Amino acid sequence: MTAPIYKRILLKLSGEALAGNKTQGLDSDVLREIGETVKIISDMNVEVAIVVGGGNFWRGRTSEGMDRVTADHMGMLATAMNALAISDALEQAGAVTRVLSAIEMRQFAEPFIRKRAVRHLEKGRIVVFACGTGNPYFSTDTAAALRCTEIEADILLKATMVDGVYDKDPRVHSDAKKYDHVNYDEILSKNLGIMDATAAALCRDNNVKIGVFSMENLHNIVDMVCGEDIGTIVSD
């Protein structure tokens, strides 16, 4: 197996991905495969942190009539459930994990403290971040960009349902063009849609390198960590 080119990564997973072929909830087979794949990366002496969304349980922005702040708080609780599920899958694969939450829930997770998170990573523990940034109006993509910056990860790996960044949705347009490399300003000016503008601007301002790849084959995570020519790289 090719050697990894990154020492510390942050992996961003959508909540929907954890549902597999279901429309919502959790797919045990997907969780098991994620756990086994991330354990491979950890065994390569790569420090791994994970941010997960909550869309398989709750899509707050589509809740008509509900106060936005309340809806976002409910979404944070959904990410906490997913974080615990991923942590359990990793532990069953033989990894050692810690769940750190932006919202205090000491019975389930440690509070997020940056130096504590870094120390866990240095000790070889896989850190799963829950509850986004802890603030409404910010997506889990923004949380991933923030945590990636805080822990000084080498790259933010964003798992998606397509195999990279395209100039338009390849699931709709057969003539969509894939980018092997794209810069932050293009992501923003062309509205390429890999993450919201706040997250993209935060990555640009802090020079956070992003790797976008398909989650259809989870071994792509390993390939990205090893620098294989797949997906799309976003940098300056």
Image: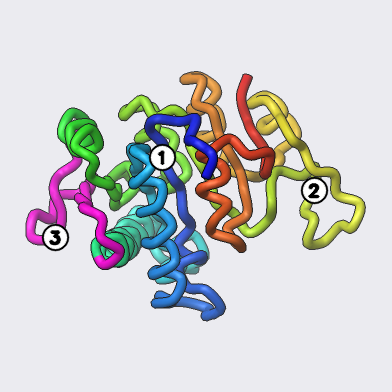
Describe the element under mark 3 as helix, strand or loop.
loop
Q: Which of the pair 87/136 is nearer the observer? A: 87
Number of other residues with Cα within 10 Å of mark 1, as a class: few under 14, some 14 to 19, many 20 or more: many
Residue 105 can be seen in this image: yes
Q: Nearer the viewer, residue 216 or 203?
A: 216
Residue carrying label 1: 10
The answer to whether marks 2 and 3 mark residues whose Cβ atoms lie closer than 8 Å is no
| 94 sits to left or right of 230 | left
Residue sitting at x 63%, y 31%: 234
- Does residue 96 show up magenta in the picture? yes
The residue that disc 2 covers is 168
Which of marks 3 and 2 precedes in the sequence? 3
Q: As displayed, is residue 117 above or below residue 28?
A: above
What predominant SS class does the magenta segment belong to?
Answer: loop
Nearer the N terminus, badge 2 or badge 1? 1
Q: Give the range drawn in magenta.
A: 92-113
Q: What element carries label 2?
A: loop
